[in-house]
Image (cartoon, rainbow, N blue to C red):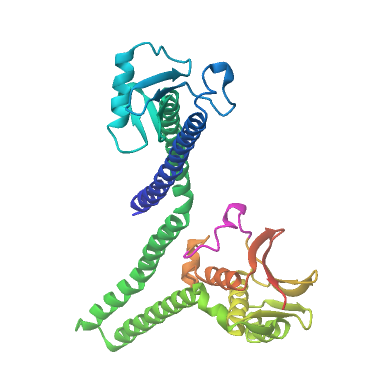
Amino acid sequence: MIKRLRFKFVFVNMSIVALLLCVIFGLIFYFTGANLERESIQMMQNIASQPVQLGTPSELDEQVRLPFFTLQLGPHGELISTGGGYYDLSDDVFLDQLIDMAFASPKRLGVIQEYNLRYYRVDTPMSQCLVFADISSEKATMDGLMRTCLFIGGVSFVAFLWVSILLSKWAVRPVERAWKQQRQFVAAASHELKTPLTVILTNAELMQEPGYDEEKRERFLESILTMSRQMRRLIEQMLELARADSAEAEQAFAPVELSRLAAQAALPFEPLYFERGLTLTLDIEKEIQVMGDQAQLRQLMEILLDNAHKYSSPGGTTWVSLRRRGKGRCVLQVADEGAPIPEEELGQIFKRFYRADPARSRTGSFGLGLSIAESIVRQHHGTIWAQSKDGINTFFVDLPCA
């Protein structure tokens, strides 16, 4: 899929580049040829307007830039005089042939391809004048321009092709990353659902066996309910993650007093911390407001507090701090005393289904909480990161104030 996408990207880019190169060089070639032809015709018209004065090259006007010669004809088409000085005009047969070719066409202006000559015919009541100009240099210029355009076009096409290949890698990188994350997400979700499904099926099959008493059947049923609730929590978290990723949530943003919300979100956790012998300390600056979704921000607080509650060391302390930073930002910190998080894992813990300790799955953790928290923070135009130092694990959330 990614290779096809890159190929389409390069094909479309190179089609546009090829079209532009053809148009640009075509216009250059056309206007150059038209300009040379216009100068040649203008020169011939100047010569025809004063055929007597242009008898020798020394008397040429500044606008005469091409080799030329003139033929003056009588009333009956007989050759009267020649001029120009650029050609050997002693061959009467050759001159008669040129006269016949010039008069064979009804047009006053034309080209004799056999001799690379452009002619211009001027008719007067008593005589006729033919002006011939050499177009060999004009053709040579156009041929050279054609070769130059083909060379530059070929080099440009190859250069753009190389750039397009590099750009295709950069352009499809987000799609490739999303595709890879999606496959990892599906694989991880399937793995997380596989274990409880296996337990449910096994216990359901055992309940159908007639050899077990009522007490064991009760135990099988309890195991089925436990695994079903675990699957429901996983599915709910996956739905929460999908909702957090949706940009539509930004449409419901409104001013939220984060100070009050943080204090209220911490209240339900105080009994839980007390039961485990943990200490929960709050240090919240008042009247800090942010633009956001109140339900999502409350969920963010609950995820961080639940994470600290699960992984704090026995008898440890959890600190919750909310402070302004500068004029337009605020920082929320949730720190707990727990097992140190290795440096290489600090950037991995926000990935979906990531657990630094596989044993954490036994606590009911699926590795989605911090991913949901990161999505919520990203929706609110903030940043979230973790730090582990001196036995204290701290999660920082930086948000813009309202």
Query: Vertically, is 66 above or below 237?
Result: above
Q: Nearer the viewer, residue 170 or 16?
A: 16
Residue at the (53%, 68%) spot, across then down: 371
Residue 330 screen position, x and y as percent: 74, 72
Q: Is residue 94 magenta?
A: no
Q: Nearer the viewer, residue 350 or 281?
A: 350
Tell which residue pokes out farthest to the left in this image.
210
Q: Nearer the viewer, residue 290 or 120?
A: 120
Residue 77 screen position, x and y as percent: 32, 26
Q: Nearer the viewer, residue 340 or 377?
A: 377
Residue at the (70%, 81%) spot, across then down: 258
Q: Quadrant of residue 281?
A: bottom right
Query: Vertically, is 228 above or below 359?
Result: below
Quadrant showing the C terminus: bottom right
Q: Quadrant of residue 390?
A: bottom right
Q: Is residue 96 left or right of residue 318?
A: left
Q: Quadrant of residue 230?
A: bottom left
Question: What span is colored magenta in the figure?
Answer: 340-353
